[in-house]
Amino acid sequence: MPRSTIFQSILVPLDGSPLAEQAVPLAAGLARRAGSKLRLALVHQRLAAAHNDAAAATSLELAARKSEHAYLHGFADTLRAGGTEVASVVTLSGLTGPSLAAHVQDLGIDLVVMATHGRGGLQRAWLGSVADYLVRSLDVPVLLVRPGEKGAPGLAEPGKGQILVPLDGSPLAEQVLEPATELAKTLDAEMVLLQVVQPVLMGEGMMPTAPSAYDQELTELSREVAQDYVRDVAERLREQGLRASGVAVIGWSVAGSILSAARPGQAAVVALATHGRAGLRRLALGSVADKLVRGADVPVLVYRPSKVTQSKPKPSSPRSSDRRLAAKERG
């Protein structure tokens, strides 16, 4: 089975809760298949002083740290007994997000796997804000798992399942292809590239609800251009020995169309790039990534590229769909 060359070190942040622990089986399975080292980390939350009693506060702190140490090492021993190599177990101090981000950088972590609160009423849980912080701060991919009542989704069997990669034709979106490719190799999964083409409205002020409100010919031409694009990207991946295909679909909602394609039992993981920090005070992950993380029933690999390099395209003759689309727009 192909071995991953990127995910050599995988970090799972824990907080002692069953919710956070639901990310462990996925991370452990990836580590075993990729031959990677698994690392566990917990950020100690300093306790408030008990009635300004310094001695009592110190005693509580020592007891909490001892309990956290025993928890992490007990978890590591269980994983090792199951055949997972656990390279390090550490309790950190400080603010949770920055402490974990610094730990990732110091140890050269290649992938972070963690649970996030998703839809449920856990909006104040640290895992939600910390996951958001790490996605916006790290230059390595973060694999997010939305816990469920019956546990988080696990790994697909080798050779089954798909890595669904939403693209939009931009160099930024394509930056996720490298970690997605390594994940596909690790899981022996097919890569399915998806571009969602929103209908082209017939005029300003039209409500995008009725089928008659958009230009069907121009929309179909846009879909054909997108289909050519994802097929070309898939062909490049097949040249690397991967199983890959591409499809362009028409949909009013980009996130909704991706979620419809990310059906459990078919898609194993959704992988996408996000623009991260810039100008996203309302939706830190970006609207599409945010909706996928909160709504997908499969793990979501989110990657914020540190920089986007524009690759120079190979010269080629314009496709008929490109020519017809340009003519339609001019006319």
Image: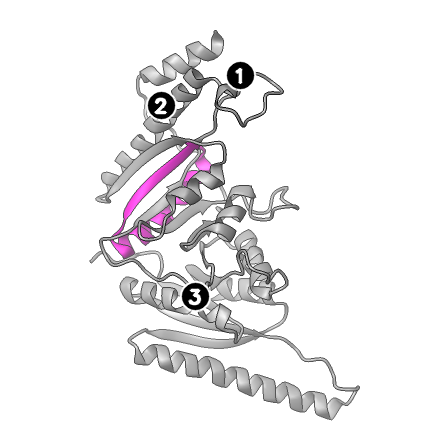
273 w.r.t. 53: above or below: above
* Disc with the residue nearer the chain's start (2 vs 3): 3
Along the viewing direction, whichever of 62 and 285 lies nearer the viewer: 285
**Disc 2, SS:** helix
| Residue at 52%, 52% in the rendered image | 294
| Residue at 52%, 24% in the rendered image | 210
- Residue under label 2, please give it: 224
Crowd rating for badge 3 (residues with CA inside 10 Å; few <14, some 14–19, many 20+): many
Residue 193 - label? none
| Residue at 77%, 90% in the rendered image | 53
The kind of residue tagged 2 is Glu
Residue 62 visible here: yes
Quadrant of residue 236 within the rendered picture:
top left
Residue 47 shown left or right of residue 102 in the figure = right
Does the stretch in magenta take in 214?
no
Asked if the residue under mark 1 is in contact with the one under mark 3, i.e. CB atoms within 8 Å, the reply is no
32 w.r.t. 267: above or below: below
Cα distance in 3D space between marks 2 and 3: 39 Å
Q: Which residues are magenta?
A: 169-196
172 w.r.t. 10: above or below: above
Quadrant of residue 73 within the rendered picture:
bottom left
Crowd rating for badge 2 (residues with CA inside 10 Å; few <14, some 14–19, many 20+): many
In the rendered image, residue 23, in percent from the top left (x then y), is placed at 43, 66
- Residue under label 3, please give it: 23
- Residue under label 1, please give it: 202
In the rendered image, residue 96, in percent from the top left (x then y), is placed at 60, 67
Quadrant of residue 54 within the rendered picture:
bottom right
Cα distance in 3D space between marks 2 and 1: 18 Å
Q: How is the image coloured?
A: one colour
